[in-house]
Amino acid sequence: MSKCKKEYAFFIGLPLVLGGISGFLNQSSMEKYGNWIQPPLSPPSWVFPVAWMALYILMGVGAAMVYCKKGESWQTSIKLFLAQLFVNVFWVYFFFTLEWTLFAFFWLVALLLLVLAMTASFAKSVPLAAKLQIPYILWLVFAGYLNLGIWFLNK
């Protein structure tokens, strides 16, 4: 890692900054979460920024590991990392700001598929980088449950 400090800073910082910007720009809309009828197991709203911060760090560490090793399919891995990050950032806008909850669910499915592809690509060169994405995948499945539940209960 010592020879790749700048790369780690970039790949960890990028999702944190983009997630922070997205959260800031959609902040007033995110307050709606507490006003919606929610499915069972819905966490309190403070859980989301904490969870996302951890997930952004894990995805960034994984991407940096792959980039610094430059093993098999590293370019594809980084393209998938950037693509899923782009899709990730817009989910907040679709779900909270526009309240397109059903559309946001399908957007989230697309995000999950991108993350699965990214994880498979990471595994080809740095298996540990792929394993670091498991919490992200599980969180997206849980987010899908919450998203679909909120759509169903509030339509």
Image (tube, helix red, strand yellow):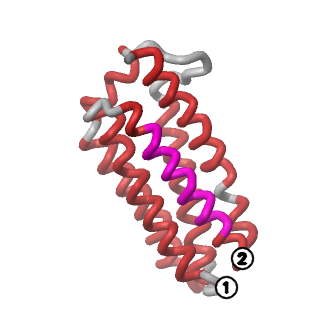
Q: What residue type is labelled 2?
A: Lys
Q: Specify start and end residues of the magenta stretch as a single range.
A: 105-120
Q: Which amino acid does label 1 sit on?
A: Glu
Quadrant that contains the N terminus: bottom right
Using the image, determine if residue 149 lies above or below residue 57.
above
Using the image, determine if residue 128 lies above or below residue 106.
below
Query: Percent position (x, y) of residue 86?
Result: 38, 59
Indicate which disc residue 72 carries: 1
Q: Which residue is drawn at 41% across and 32% down?
A: 102
**First of labels 1, 2 by sequence position:** 1
- The residue carrying mark 2 is 124
Q: Which residue is drawn at 52% across and 31% down?
A: 47
Q: Residues within 10 Å of mark 2 (few under 14, many from 20)?
A: some
Using the image, determine if residue 52 lies above or below residue 7.
above
> Is residue 103 shown in magenta?
no
Q: Are marks 1 and 2 in contact (CB under 8 Å)?
A: yes
The total of numbered circles placed on residues is 2
Residue 57 quadrant: bottom right
Q: Which residue is drawn at 30% across and 50% down?
A: 21
Query: Percent position (x, y) of residue 129?
Result: 67, 67
Mark 1 secondary-structure assignment: loop
Q: Which residue is drawn at 36% across and 14% down?
A: 35
